[in-house]
Image (spheres, coloured by chain):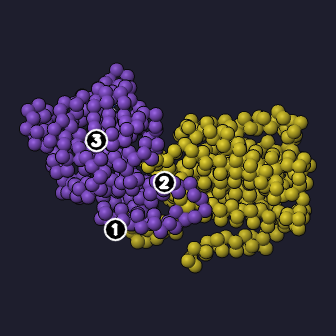
Chain colours: A purple, B yellow
């Protein structure tokens, strides 16, 4: 099968069960959202899929191949990428340098020593295209730490997209972004390539309902339910969870 | 374009001027130049890649002993001796780095110190080969490139060391702008993100550490050939620590910082120690404190800092 296929995935931290028997599919071109209260295990699930954490049980297959034995860097090479819930960039490098790095590494040029990092016209063209795609043109030569937070979140997405992944997990892309700027994040997600499988983890329901065609609800490490946005919006359990919970 | 060649030109001019201004201090000038090579190696490891180390002298000492032994037992050719020194430094860095690069922070620093101590102890015990505490003597390097003989005044030694230093500088300048150099800066900024873009941070750090070891080995080889003596002091903790202070003084990650910091530290040391052999450390201490407080990015950053201050930029005074 093409895309991501997770079966019976579980993860324990000592006695704490954070993922429990999760079955999850994400075919090419999918736009899924993973929602749930704080501490439900959403980031943990993302970290299991990308190889930052190793599971306590279950299988993860991508394009029909078991990726259990691969570390994070090797899974990136297979096409699995994720953004960080807590912005993780190269702060003192410019936007352009931030984006040049993943493209160079993807092209296997990262260990070249005797040519200029900016000397490959094709790579530079691609970096420029990414900068334009995320409307970062005027900021291209500024260190990332000079950027406003919302713009840093865009660089966060651009950095992962620069790897040309086939599966992209966005871990709370709008976290901490003022609501007046979330539309920038939403537009950026809408502009992602059609054949890319996208999983968005997010608390902002506006964003979730704008971009997701299907929503998975995770509660205490278990999948509570999965459905279309309408089904989830009308689901009594979910409504109770969100009306009674910390997020609305 | 012209601006880019100004700093290296100034550096060369300063070196030539120093030669004519201080003709009776060539040995001291040469020591500075060799120290610059060691501090440059530290700039690659610490300044570029962010690998915290207080044991760069391990590779320096390995290079010194290797070049000395090579000259005595194998071939007196200086350039071949440099290669031997570089290889020794690189091999030691690769072997120790295979373990060290899996650690970070304080653990890493302690381990780098330990490696240098172990090397010193091995050199001390292997008296038959290294001369132990008496040092390795009897190094008689041949003519440089078969033309220039090492003289008593140290003229050949100075130009030879300077040529090697400029070459190392040029290679590191090219490296710094390369994809590899960029990836080291990336690792310095965020190892987690580097893993996330598909890089084995461990391997990349090991490569940088090995390269830095090779350059430190070259510095050690220069000392062995020019002073024609290698002592256990080449492995000393104080050498590693002084190299670190010089780099911080000048500013990390920009190569010129390594040059400036070394020249200033050693000049101040020279003058202050001559005037007041007991209190010169206070002068150095005050200098380091002043730089850390007023120029946290190092002396090489002074022009940028001044520019920002005068423009009232957003980072002024921060
Ligand atoms: N490395 C770890 N060691 C121990 N416990 C952990 C670890 N990482 C996460 N946890 C715990 O696992 C649970 C799930 O954490 P996770 O970060 O996956 O939640 P989340 O759904 O992403 O929450 P949020 O919406 O706040 O981001 C939490 O109780 C957390 O404290
Ligand atoms: Mg989370």
* Numbered disc 1: secondary structure: helix
**For this view, does B51 lie left or right of residue A10?**
right
Give the numbered dot on residue A26.
3
Badge 1 crowding class, 10 Å Cα cut-off, few under 14, some 14 to 19, many 20 or more, is some
Q: Is residue A237 above or below residue B248?
A: above
Q: Chain of mark 1?
A: A
> At which x and y percent is residue A40?
25, 32
CB atoms of marks 1 and 2 within 8 Å: no
Co-location on one chain, circles 1 and 2? yes
Q: Residue at 61% across / 48% down in the picture?
A: B207
Q: Nearer the viewer, residue A218 or B45?
A: A218
Q: Is mark 1 within 8 Å of ligand 2?
A: no
Residue position for label 2:
A105
Q: Residue at 40% across / 72% down in the picture?
A: B311
Q: Earlier in the sequence, mark 1 or mark 2?
A: 2
> At which x and y percent is residue A220?
24, 28
Q: Earlier in the sequence, mark 2 or mark 3?
A: 3
């Amino acid at each position: 099968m093409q895309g991501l296929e997770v079966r019976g995935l579980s993860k324990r931290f000592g006695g704490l069960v954070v993922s429990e028997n999760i079955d999850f599919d994400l075919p090419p071109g999918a736009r899924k959202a993973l929602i749930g209260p704080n501490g439900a295990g959403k980031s943990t699930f993302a970290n299991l899929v990308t190889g930052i954490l190793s599971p306590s049980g279950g299988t993860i297959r991508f394009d029909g191949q078991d990726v259990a034995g691969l570390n994070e860097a090797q899974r990136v090479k297979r096409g699995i990428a994720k953004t960080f819930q807590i912005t993780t960039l190269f702060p003192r490098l410019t936007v352009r340098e931030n984006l040049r790095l993943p493209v160079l590494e993807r092209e296997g040029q990262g260990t070249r020593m005797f040519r200029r990092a900016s000397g490959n016209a094709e790579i530079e063209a691609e970096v420029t295209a990414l900068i334009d795609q995320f409307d970062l043109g005027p900021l291209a030569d500024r260190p990332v730490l000079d950027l406003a937070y919302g713009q840093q979140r865009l660089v966060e997405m651009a950095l992962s997209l620069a790897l040309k992944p086939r599966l992209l997990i966005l871990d709370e892309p709008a976290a901490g972004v003022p609501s007046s700027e979330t539309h920038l994040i939403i537009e950026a997600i809408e502009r992602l390539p059609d054949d890319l499988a996208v999983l968005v983890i997010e608390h902002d329901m506006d964003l979730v309902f704008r971009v997701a065609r299907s929503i998975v609800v995770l509660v205490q490490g278990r999948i509570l339910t999965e459905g279309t946005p309408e089904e989830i919006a009308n689901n009594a359990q979910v409504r109770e969870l969100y009306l009674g919970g910390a997020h609305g | 374009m012209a601006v880019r060649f100004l700093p290296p030109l100034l550096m060369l001019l300063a070196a030539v001027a120093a030669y004519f201004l201080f003709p009776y201090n060539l040995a001291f000038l040469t020591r500075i130049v060799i120290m610059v090579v060691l501090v440059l190696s530290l700039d690659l490891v610490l300044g570029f890649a962010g690998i915290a180390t207080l044991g760069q002298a391990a590779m320096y000492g390995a290079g010194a002993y290797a070049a000395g032994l090579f000259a005595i037992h194998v071939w007196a050719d200086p350039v071949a001796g440099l290669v031997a020194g570089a290889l020794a430094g690189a091999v030691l860095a690769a072997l120790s780095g295979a373990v060290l690069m899996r650690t970070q922070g304080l653990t890493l620093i302690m381990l780098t110190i330990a490696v240098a101590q172990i090397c010193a102890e091995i050199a001390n015990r292997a008296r038959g080969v290294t001369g132990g505490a008496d040092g390795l003597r009897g190094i008689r390097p041949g003519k440089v490139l078969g033309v220039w003989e090492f003289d008593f005044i140290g003229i050949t030694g100075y130009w030879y060391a300077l040529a090697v230093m400029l070459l190392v500088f040029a290679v590191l300048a090219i490296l710094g702008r390369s994809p590899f150099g960029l990836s080291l800066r990336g690792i310095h900024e965020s190892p987690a993100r580097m893993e996330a873009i598909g890089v084995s941070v461990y391997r990349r750090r090991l490569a940088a550490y090995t390269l830095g070891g090779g350059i430190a080995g070259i510095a050690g080889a220069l000392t062995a050939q020019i002073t024609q003596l290698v002592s256990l002091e080449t492995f000393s903790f104080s050498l590693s620590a002084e190299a670190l202070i010089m780099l911080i003084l000048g500013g990390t990650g920009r190569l010129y910082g390594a040059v400036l910091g070394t020249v200033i530290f050693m000049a101040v040391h020279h003058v202050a120690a001559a005037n007041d052999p007991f209190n010169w450390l206070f002068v150095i201490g005050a200098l380091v404190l002043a730089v850390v407080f007023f120029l946290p990015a190092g002396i090489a950053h002074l022009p940028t800092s001044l520019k920002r201050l005068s423009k009232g930029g957003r980072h002024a005074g921060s």
